[in-house]
Image (cartoon, rainbow, N blue to C red):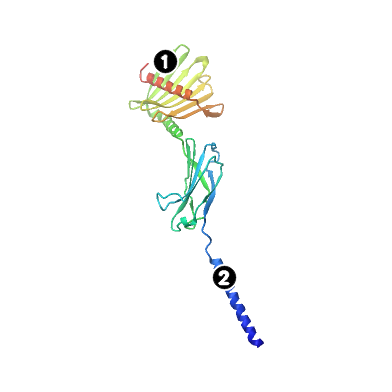
């Protein structure tokens, strides 16, 4: 009898071991649970840029395979602390394994916007559930106007030029008028106020209106500039750029000072055209 029982026990043990092995293999081969969130950080490509407390960051998870569809998840941050950590929670059932998903981030700070130069794919097609994003600052409307102005400054040597002068009590004024065809597009004005100082100002024009003004103030003609005031207006006549560089620091130029530069530009334009 003992000889019969032992083989039966051995067979039962082997069968039980086989069940445990199959259970372990099944657990090992089971698919991991589907993600229910994506996370990461948002930073700036240029970390030297400072953002104000009014900056607003928007992060969203988007199915780019379905154009026009609503984001799977969204989150906004204000104020923004860079690098900003984010986590977007969503229902795993809302994700289609055959679609392509990306994290999109954008930030607005006053008139400056920040966007993503590169896509950040996640979740499907072997992509992870994390994405670290570096935003790139875009030029402000005012900076775009100033870039166009700087380009024009470099090209005035190829434009037709005429000169003018005017003497008044205590003030000596001279200017160069640059034309593209018959249109005045640029004027450089030098004004000597004697003991009261000297100004060198470049004015640019579009459609007969002051576009940009850049004025250096000096103690004398050959002296070093003590300040440089800049102002720019868009096609609608709106003031979109105003700065004052003085003492190695840049600060906003006052609206009144910007309006005064515009008035000076209009006055010298009248002289440059032969008016009074």
User: Dividing the image into 4 quarters, which one contains the N terminus?
Assistant: bottom right
- Secondary structure of the residue carrying tag 2 is helix
Residues marked 1 and 2 touching at CB (< 8 Å): no
Q: Is residue 3 left or right of residue 156?
A: right
Label 2 CA crowd tier, 10 Å (few <14, some 14–19, many 20+):
few
Q: Is residue 186 left or right of residue 127?
A: left
Q: Is residue 75 above or below residue 250?
A: below
**Mark 1 or 2, nearer chain start:** 2
User: Dividing the image into 4 quarters, which one contains the C terminus?
Assistant: top left
In the foreground, 29 or 143: 29
Q: x and y percent of residue 145 in the render? A: 43, 32
Q: Is residue 33 above or below residue 216?
A: below
Question: Outermost residue toward the bottom?
Answer: 1
* Circle on res. 248: none
Q: At 46% across and 53% down in the image, what residue appears?
A: 101
Q: Where is mark 1, residue-wise?
A: 166
Q: x and y percent of residue 136 in the render? A: 49, 42
Question: Outermost residue toward the right?
Answer: 2
In the foreground, 228 or 18: 18
Q: At 58% across and 75% down in the image, what residue appears?
A: 18
Label 1 CA crowd tier, 10 Å (few <14, some 14–19, many 20+):
few
Q: Is residue 239 above or below residue 191?
A: below
What is the CA distance from the residue labelled 1 to the residue labelled 2?
99 Å
Q: Is residue 86 above or below residue 247?
A: below
Q: Where is mark 2, residue-wise?
A: 23
Q: x and y percent of residue 32 in the render? A: 53, 61
Q: Is residue 161 left or right of residue 101?
A: left
- Secondary structure of the residue carrying tag 1 is strand
């Amino acid at each position: 009898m003992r000889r019969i029982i032992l083989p039966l026990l051995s067979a039962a043990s082997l069968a039980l071991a086989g069940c445990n092995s199959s259970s372990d293999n099944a657990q090992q081969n089971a698919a991991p649970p589907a993600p229910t969130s994506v996370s990461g950080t948002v930073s700036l490509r240029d970390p030297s840029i400072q953002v104000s407390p009014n900056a607003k960051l928007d992060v969203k998870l988007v199915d780019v395979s379905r154009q026009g569809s609503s984001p799977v998840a969204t989150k906004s941050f204000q104020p923004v602390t860079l690098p900003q950590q984010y986590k977007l929670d969503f229902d795993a059932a809302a994700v289609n394994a055959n679609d392509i998903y990306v994290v999109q981030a954008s930030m607005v700070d006053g008139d400056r916007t920040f966007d993503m130069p590169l896509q950040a794919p996640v979740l499907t097609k072997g992509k992870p559930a994390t994405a670290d994003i570096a935003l790139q600052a875009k030029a402000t409307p005012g900076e775009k106007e100033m870039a166009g102005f700087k380009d024009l400054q470099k090209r005035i040597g190829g434009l037709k030029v005429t000169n003018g002068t005017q003497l008044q009590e205590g003030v000596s004024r001279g200017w160069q008028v640059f034309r593209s065809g018959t249109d005045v597009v640029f004027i450089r004005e030098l004004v000597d106020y004697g003991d009261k100082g000297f100004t060198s100002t470049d004015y640019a024009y579009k459609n007969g209106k002051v576009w940009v003004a850049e004025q250096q103030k000096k103690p004398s003609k050959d002296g070093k500039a003590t300040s440089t005031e800049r102002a720019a207006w868009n096609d609608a006549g709106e003031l979109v750029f105003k700065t004052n560089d003085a003492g190695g620091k840049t600060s906003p130029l006052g609206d009144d000072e910007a309006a005064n530069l515009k008035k000076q530009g209009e006055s010298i334009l009248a002289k440059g055209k032969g008016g009074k």
